[in-house]
Image (cartoon, grey):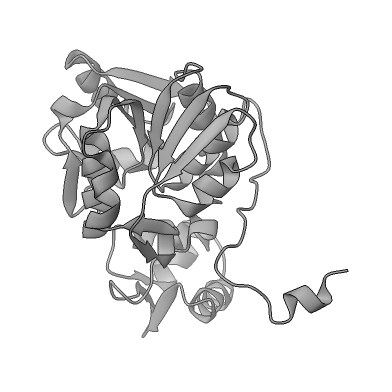
Amino acid sequence: MQQVLRMLETRDSVHVTELAEVLSVSEVTVRSDLSELARQGLVARVRGGVRPLQRGQSELAFDLRLRLEAERKQAIARAAAAMVGEGEAVALDSSTTAYYLALELRAKRELVVVTNGLLIAAALADAAGISVLVTGGMLRLPAMSLVGEFGADVFRGTRIDKGFLGARGLSLERGLMDLNPEEVLIKQKMADACARVVGILDGTKWHRSALLSFVSADQVHAIVTDASAPADEVEAWRARGVEVVAVEAGSRERSPIRPRNLRRVPPNAEEGAA
Protein backbone atom coordinates (compact mmCIF):
# COMPACT_ATOMS: atom_id res chain seq x y z
CA MET A 1 0.00 0.00 0.00
CA GLN A 2 2.89 2.36 0.70
CA GLN A 3 4.27 1.67 -2.78
CA VAL A 4 0.90 2.54 -4.32
CA LEU A 5 0.84 5.86 -2.46
CA ARG A 6 4.39 6.66 -3.58
CA MET A 7 3.45 5.99 -7.20
CA LEU A 8 0.36 8.18 -6.99
CA GLU A 9 2.41 11.16 -5.84
CA THR A 10 3.72 11.50 -9.40
CA ARG A 11 1.08 9.74 -11.52
CA ASP A 12 -2.57 10.15 -12.44
CA SER A 13 -3.46 6.51 -11.77
CA VAL A 14 -2.09 3.02 -11.22
CA HIS A 15 -3.67 -0.20 -12.38
CA VAL A 16 -4.17 -3.61 -10.83
CA THR A 17 -2.34 -5.58 -13.52
CA GLU A 18 0.70 -3.30 -13.37
CA LEU A 19 0.87 -3.46 -9.58
CA ALA A 20 0.56 -7.25 -9.55
CA GLU A 21 3.53 -7.49 -11.91
CA VAL A 22 5.69 -4.86 -10.20
CA LEU A 23 5.06 -6.19 -6.68
CA SER A 24 5.00 -9.91 -7.63
CA VAL A 25 1.67 -10.53 -5.91
CA SER A 26 -1.70 -11.71 -7.13
CA GLU A 27 -4.32 -9.36 -8.53
CA VAL A 28 -6.61 -10.48 -5.71
CA THR A 29 -4.09 -9.16 -3.17
CA VAL A 30 -3.72 -5.90 -5.08
CA ARG A 31 -7.49 -5.36 -5.24
CA SER A 32 -7.79 -6.00 -1.51
CA ASP A 33 -5.09 -3.45 -0.69
CA LEU A 34 -6.57 -0.88 -3.07
CA SER A 35 -9.97 -1.33 -1.44
CA GLU A 36 -8.40 -0.73 1.97
CA LEU A 37 -6.70 2.47 0.76
CA ALA A 38 -10.02 3.67 -0.65
CA ARG A 39 -11.78 2.79 2.62
CA GLN A 40 -9.27 4.96 4.49
CA GLY A 41 -10.07 7.85 2.15
CA LEU A 42 -6.56 8.00 0.67
CA VAL A 43 -7.35 7.11 -2.97
CA ALA A 44 -10.32 6.91 -5.34
CA ARG A 45 -11.19 3.65 -7.06
CA VAL A 46 -11.49 3.69 -10.85
CA ARG A 47 -12.06 0.89 -13.31
CA GLY A 48 -9.02 -1.39 -13.13
CA GLY A 49 -7.14 0.55 -10.46
CA VAL A 50 -7.02 3.74 -8.37
CA ARG A 51 -6.29 7.44 -8.80
CA PRO A 52 -5.36 10.19 -6.32
CA LEU A 53 -8.22 12.12 -4.79
CA GLN A 54 -8.82 15.48 -6.39
CA ARG A 55 -6.71 18.29 -4.96
CA GLY A 56 -8.62 19.83 -2.08
CA GLN A 57 -10.50 16.63 -1.23
CA SER A 58 -7.67 14.98 0.62
CA GLU A 59 -3.93 14.62 0.81
CA LEU A 60 -1.86 11.82 2.18
CA ALA A 61 -2.30 12.14 5.93
CA PHE A 62 0.69 13.25 8.02
CA ASP A 63 0.81 10.13 10.18
CA LEU A 64 0.81 7.89 7.11
CA ARG A 65 3.50 9.94 5.35
CA LEU A 66 5.51 9.69 8.54
CA ARG A 67 5.82 5.94 7.97
CA LEU A 68 6.95 6.29 4.35
CA GLU A 69 10.75 6.07 4.07
CA ALA A 70 10.92 6.27 7.87
CA GLU A 71 14.49 4.93 8.22
CA ARG A 72 15.79 7.36 5.62
CA LYS A 73 14.04 10.30 7.25
CA GLN A 74 15.37 9.36 10.69
CA ALA A 75 18.94 9.14 9.37
CA ILE A 76 18.54 12.51 7.63
CA ALA A 77 17.17 14.01 10.85
CA ARG A 78 20.19 12.86 12.85
CA ALA A 79 22.60 14.40 10.34
CA ALA A 80 20.61 17.64 10.20
CA ALA A 81 20.52 17.87 14.01
CA ALA A 82 24.33 17.74 14.03
CA MET A 83 24.29 21.03 12.11
CA VAL A 84 22.44 22.81 14.91
CA GLY A 85 24.44 24.44 17.66
CA GLU A 86 23.07 25.13 21.11
CA GLY A 87 21.82 28.66 21.52
CA GLU A 88 20.72 28.98 17.89
CA ALA A 89 17.35 29.88 16.44
CA VAL A 90 16.12 27.43 13.81
CA ALA A 91 13.02 27.15 11.65
CA LEU A 92 11.28 23.86 10.84
CA ASP A 93 8.50 23.54 8.31
CA SER A 94 5.61 21.08 8.68
CA SER A 95 7.21 18.19 6.75
CA THR A 96 7.49 14.69 8.19
CA THR A 97 11.29 14.83 7.99
CA ALA A 98 11.15 18.00 10.08
CA TYR A 99 9.10 16.05 12.63
CA TYR A 100 11.89 13.50 12.98
CA LEU A 101 14.38 16.37 13.21
CA ALA A 102 12.34 17.87 16.05
CA LEU A 103 12.70 14.61 17.97
CA GLU A 104 16.48 14.77 17.52
CA LEU A 105 16.60 18.39 18.69
CA ARG A 106 15.01 17.57 22.04
CA ALA A 107 18.48 16.96 23.47
CA LYS A 108 19.68 20.49 22.59
CA ARG A 109 19.79 23.35 25.08
CA GLU A 110 19.00 27.06 24.77
CA LEU A 111 17.42 26.51 21.37
CA VAL A 112 14.62 28.54 19.81
CA VAL A 113 12.50 26.67 17.26
CA VAL A 114 10.09 28.47 14.97
CA THR A 115 7.58 26.25 13.16
CA ASN A 116 4.23 26.24 11.42
CA GLY A 117 3.76 22.54 12.16
CA LEU A 118 1.52 21.75 15.12
CA LEU A 119 2.87 18.22 15.47
CA ILE A 120 6.45 19.51 15.30
CA ALA A 121 5.60 21.97 18.08
CA ALA A 122 3.95 19.21 20.13
CA ALA A 123 7.06 17.03 19.79
CA LEU A 124 9.12 19.81 21.38
CA ALA A 125 6.56 21.14 23.85
CA ASP A 126 8.02 19.49 26.96
CA ALA A 127 11.70 19.53 25.89
CA ALA A 128 13.79 21.26 28.55
CA GLY A 129 15.77 24.21 27.28
CA ILE A 130 13.85 24.63 24.02
CA SER A 131 11.58 27.59 23.36
CA VAL A 132 8.97 26.98 20.66
CA LEU A 133 7.42 29.76 18.61
CA VAL A 134 4.40 28.64 16.56
CA THR A 135 3.29 30.80 13.67
CA GLY A 136 -0.35 31.77 13.44
CA GLY A 137 -2.66 31.27 10.51
CA MET A 138 -5.31 28.95 9.15
CA LEU A 139 -5.15 25.29 10.13
CA ARG A 140 -4.41 23.00 7.20
CA LEU A 141 -5.47 19.53 8.30
CA PRO A 142 -3.51 17.20 5.94
CA ALA A 143 -0.17 18.51 7.23
CA MET A 144 -1.43 19.71 10.63
CA SER A 145 0.14 23.03 9.68
CA LEU A 146 -0.69 26.72 10.01
CA VAL A 147 -0.64 28.64 6.75
CA GLY A 148 -1.57 32.02 5.32
CA GLU A 149 -0.44 35.63 5.47
CA PHE A 150 -1.16 35.91 9.19
CA GLY A 151 1.49 33.30 9.96
CA ALA A 152 3.88 34.69 7.37
CA ASP A 153 3.94 37.99 9.29
CA VAL A 154 5.99 36.30 12.03
CA PHE A 155 9.00 36.17 9.70
CA ARG A 156 9.00 39.85 8.80
CA GLY A 157 11.91 41.49 10.60
CA THR A 158 12.99 38.14 12.11
CA ARG A 159 16.47 36.68 11.62
CA ILE A 160 16.86 32.92 12.09
CA ASP A 161 20.17 31.06 11.99
CA LYS A 162 19.07 28.02 9.98
CA GLY A 163 15.91 26.83 8.28
CA PHE A 164 15.26 23.14 7.62
CA LEU A 165 12.72 22.62 4.84
CA GLY A 166 11.28 19.50 3.29
CA ALA A 167 10.25 19.38 -0.38
CA ARG A 168 8.31 17.25 -2.85
CA GLY A 169 11.06 17.67 -5.44
CA LEU A 170 14.20 19.60 -6.36
CA SER A 171 16.25 20.57 -9.38
CA LEU A 172 19.06 22.98 -10.18
CA GLU A 173 16.70 24.82 -12.51
CA ARG A 174 13.79 25.25 -10.07
CA GLY A 175 15.30 24.74 -6.63
CA LEU A 176 13.09 23.23 -3.92
CA MET A 177 9.49 22.55 -4.93
CA ASP A 178 6.16 21.70 -3.35
CA LEU A 179 2.53 21.28 -4.37
CA ASN A 180 0.31 23.33 -2.09
CA PRO A 181 0.31 27.12 -2.68
CA GLU A 182 -0.39 27.87 1.00
CA GLU A 183 2.51 25.73 2.18
CA VAL A 184 4.74 27.28 -0.49
CA LEU A 185 3.95 30.79 0.78
CA ILE A 186 4.95 30.01 4.37
CA LYS A 187 8.07 28.13 3.22
CA GLN A 188 9.13 31.15 1.14
CA LYS A 189 8.74 33.53 4.08
CA MET A 190 10.53 31.09 6.37
CA ALA A 191 13.46 30.73 3.97
CA ASP A 192 13.76 34.49 3.50
CA ALA A 193 14.18 34.92 7.27
CA CYS A 194 16.99 32.36 7.54
CA ALA A 195 20.72 33.00 7.24
CA ARG A 196 21.15 29.42 5.96
CA VAL A 197 18.58 27.27 4.17
CA VAL A 198 18.95 23.49 4.45
CA GLY A 199 16.84 21.13 2.34
CA ILE A 200 15.96 17.89 4.14
CA LEU A 201 14.64 15.28 1.75
CA ASP A 202 15.10 11.59 1.07
CA GLY A 203 16.40 10.08 -2.15
CA THR A 204 12.95 9.51 -3.65
CA LYS A 205 12.45 13.27 -4.04
CA TRP A 206 15.42 13.76 -6.38
CA HIS A 207 13.55 12.39 -9.39
CA ARG A 208 10.43 14.48 -8.83
CA SER A 209 9.13 17.81 -9.92
CA ALA A 210 6.27 19.72 -8.30
CA LEU A 211 3.91 22.53 -9.14
CA LEU A 212 5.60 25.43 -7.35
CA SER A 213 9.14 26.46 -6.46
CA PHE A 214 9.60 27.99 -3.02
CA VAL A 215 13.40 28.35 -2.79
CA SER A 216 15.68 28.87 -5.77
CA ALA A 217 18.83 26.80 -6.10
CA ASP A 218 20.89 29.91 -5.36
CA GLN A 219 19.18 30.24 -1.96
CA VAL A 220 20.00 26.69 -0.87
CA HIS A 221 23.10 26.45 1.31
CA ALA A 222 22.97 22.74 2.14
CA ILE A 223 21.00 19.57 1.44
CA VAL A 224 20.76 16.59 3.77
CA THR A 225 19.62 13.45 2.01
CA ASP A 226 20.32 9.72 2.03
CA ALA A 227 22.72 7.59 0.03
CA SER A 228 20.07 6.62 -2.54
CA ALA A 229 20.17 10.14 -4.02
CA PRO A 230 21.48 10.05 -7.63
CA ALA A 231 25.24 10.58 -7.56
CA ASP A 232 25.36 12.75 -10.69
CA GLU A 233 22.76 15.17 -9.34
CA VAL A 234 24.47 15.29 -5.94
CA GLU A 235 27.75 16.22 -7.62
CA ALA A 236 26.01 18.85 -9.74
CA TRP A 237 24.70 20.56 -6.60
CA ARG A 238 28.12 20.35 -4.97
CA ALA A 239 29.67 21.93 -8.05
CA ARG A 240 27.34 24.88 -7.45
CA GLY A 241 28.83 25.31 -3.97
CA VAL A 242 26.00 23.61 -2.06
CA GLU A 243 26.98 21.34 0.81
CA VAL A 244 25.32 17.94 0.27
CA VAL A 245 25.33 15.39 3.08
CA ALA A 246 24.24 11.90 2.00
CA VAL A 247 23.74 9.52 4.92
CA GLU A 248 23.27 5.78 5.12
CA ALA A 249 19.81 4.84 6.31
CA GLY A 250 19.22 2.22 8.98
CA SER A 251 22.55 2.58 10.79
CA ARG A 252 20.59 3.30 13.97
CA GLU A 253 17.20 1.83 13.30
CA ARG A 254 14.34 3.26 15.31
CA SER A 255 10.64 2.62 15.25
CA PRO A 256 8.71 5.65 14.05
CA ILE A 257 7.20 7.55 16.96
CA ARG A 258 3.53 8.10 16.36
CA PRO A 259 2.69 11.80 16.46
CA ARG A 260 0.30 13.07 19.08
CA ASN A 261 -3.19 13.05 17.64
CA LEU A 262 -4.35 16.66 17.72
CA ARG A 263 -7.13 16.09 15.21
CA ARG A 264 -9.85 14.68 17.38
CA VAL A 265 -10.83 14.28 21.01
CA PRO A 266 -12.79 11.09 21.73
CA PRO A 267 -16.32 11.70 23.02
CA ASN A 268 -16.49 11.69 26.81
CA ALA A 269 -12.70 11.59 26.99
CA GLU A 270 -12.69 13.30 30.35
CA GLU A 271 -15.32 10.96 31.74
CA GLY A 272 -13.28 7.94 30.70
CA ALA A 273 -10.07 9.21 32.27
CA ALA A 274 -9.38 7.76 35.67
Count of number-bearing discs: 0
- Report the side of 218 relative to 15 (left or right): left
Q: Taking the image as drawn, is residue 249 in sight?
A: no
Q: Position of residue 18 (x, y in %)?
A: 40, 66
User: Residue at the spot x=18%, y=27% of the render?
Assistant: 219
User: Residue at the spot x=59%, y=44% of the render?
Assistant: 123
Q: Taking the image as drawn, is residue 110 in sight?
A: yes
Would you place residue 108 above or below residue 174 in this image?
above
- Report the side of 207 relative to 3 (left or right): left
- Report the side of 266 relative to 92 (left or right): right
Towards the viewer: 255 or 11 = 255
User: Residue at the spot x=56%, y=51% of the render?
Assistant: 67
Q: Position of residue 7 (x, y in %)?
A: 37, 58
User: Residue at the spot x=52%, y=52% of the render?
Assistant: 119
Would you place residue 207 above or below residue 13 in this image?
above
Towards the viewer: 165 or 16 = 165
Towards the viewer: 238 or 262 = 262
